[in-house]
Image: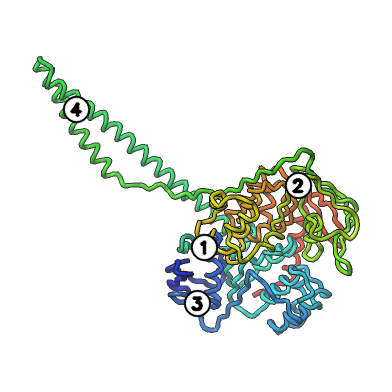
Amino acid sequence: MLLSVREIEKQFGGEQVFSNISCTLDEGHKVALVGRNGAGKSTLIKIIAGLEETDGGVVKVTSGRTVSYLPQEIAIGDGRTGVAYIQDGTDLQPHQFFPVLEGLGVSQQVAAQKLSEMSGGQQTKVLLTRFLLEPSDILLLDEPTNNLDIPALLWLEAFLAASKKAMIIISHDLLFLNNVTNRVFELKNGALTIERGSYGDYLERKKKEFDRQMKAYTRHQEEVKRLEASSRAAAKQVEKGDALELSDSDKYVARAGMDKASASQRRAKVIRRRIQRIEEVEKPFEEEPFTLELEARQAEGDIEVGLDEVVAGYKDGISIGPTTLTVKMGERLCLMGMNGEGKSTVLKTIAGIVPPLRGTVTKTEGIVLGDLMQQHERAGRDTKAVDFFREQTSRSEEEAIYMLKKAGFAEQTMQQKVGGLSSGMRARLLFAVFIALGVNVLLLDEPTNHLDMEAITALKQMLKKYTGIVLLISHNRWFLEGVEIGTCYEVANGTVQKIKDIEQYIKAAQKRAEGMIGRLKRVLR
């Protein structure tokens, strides 16, 4: 056994987050730690990493074993180069870790730059390289797929699947979890449920168990109804017998009626006892599904976003284009490509946040823009969630509370400051704002980074019905499968090129990843 967790508990502000949590981790265990946003997943993994105290219980790492922790939030913008940063944590020479950097899509030229000069995605990959190569026995990964492009994500998936190390992973990428893990820890209502098998196996067993319980409950209800109907029929027979005893002058007829009533009375008692003896079967608990319903505001004329010979980028920096395209109401456009190639820059140029270096971006009148990432970053951290909603939407307090409840907010959470909310709850807050405003152009830059499975599912369902324009950057394959993207473009080498077949694009990236991992077997243990 590598690690044991015994009866740990944690409170925040006097409220119990979880209690009596126990589990073990052994060689070859690859665990998916799942649960809603706010369930305490990140807190639990920090406790296991030794970075946060418990309010009870013990975490014990077997003597001689070591733990590495990859945080969700990354901040390494210091003066070291990427190469120096990796060497400081691994004592490896560049030729030993360059294959990992290459697999994640970081060139030797980029790795030689200072961390402070790299994009956020490139910094993430440098940190991930050091983390993967540190001499440790247990990997704790909190949202490792955030900010990874598809080629890097598929490489990481193949690397972790081939690794012999034990690991606990928090992720909202269903396919990633399904392809890497062989156990599931679900944190729900302060308790931990442990299951063997992949995440997909777990979901299937969970559904079968729910269906079994629902069938048992239905059969129970039907039997009770049948017995109650028999009881009522017997009671009516008793009433008829009573009536005969009082009014029938023929003693033989009366006696027959009384005997029949007496038998019915005995039968009714037997039925009542049977009803009492039937073991009570509770209806299985089914959580009310979280839903998002965004109705795009209509305008008198057409709603369109157009790019005419647009070059996006920065002076003395990255440059992408020229690009010409038009997106109309109801259409969905997805940008893909490696980190650092300029996908977010193109999206910011369309939004009007970054002016084009050349060309023209046009947006027709009547457009109501909802930019999840930018508004996520600009949300006033010291403002209460309910007050932020009212400032953005001009709604009354009563309307704000009603709409935030529909977005999954408890009244206590509405009173928290935006800065104190989890990233997932901030995303839910912004979607509630978008719904109130009737946003008809949605800009989504990696929206699944901030949402739990429940909210990702709700977003998928919402986008299926949404009649506005969607401009999207995402590398979550499970999410993309359900969004029904119309057109995909790859941003690479300073150009924006149409992807003819997204499935072939992903298959090619997967083949690349598997080939590179095959050559990296000596690094894995």
Residue hosting label 2: 367
Look at the numbered disc 2 and give the secondary structure of its residue: loop
Name the element at disc 4. helix
Instruction: Describe the element under mark 1 as helix, strand or loop.
Output: loop
Amino acid on which disc 4 is placed: Val
In three-dimensional space, the C-alpha distance between marks 2 and 4, rounded to whole angstroms, equals: 74 Å
Query: Which element carries disc 3, helix, strand or loop?
Result: loop
Q: Where does residue 374 sit, x and y in percent of width and height? A: 72, 60
Task: Identify which amino acid the numbered label 3 is placed on.
Answer: Glu
* Label 1 vs label 2, nearer the camera: 2
Please name the residue that numbered disc 4 is placed on: 238
Marked residue nearer the N-terminal end (1 or 2) = 1
409 up-or-down from 228: above or below: below
Q: Which residue: 56% across, 81% down?
A: 65
- Residue at position x 14%, y 25% from top? 259
Q: Nearer the viewer, mark 4 or mark 1?
A: 1
For image coordinates 57% across by 59% down, the residue present is 198
What's the distance in space between the residues labelled 1 and 2, CA to CA?
37 Å
Badge 2: residue crowd in 10 Å (few <14, some 14–19, many ≥20): many
Q: For this view, does 363 lie left or right of residue 483?
A: right
Depth order, front residue of 295/149: 295
Placement of the C terminus among the 4 image quadrants: bottom right
**Foreground of the two, 442 or 72:** 442
Quote the CA–CA distance across marks 4 and 3. 69 Å
Q: Which residue is mark 1?
A: 39
Q: Is residue 326 above or below residue 314?
A: above
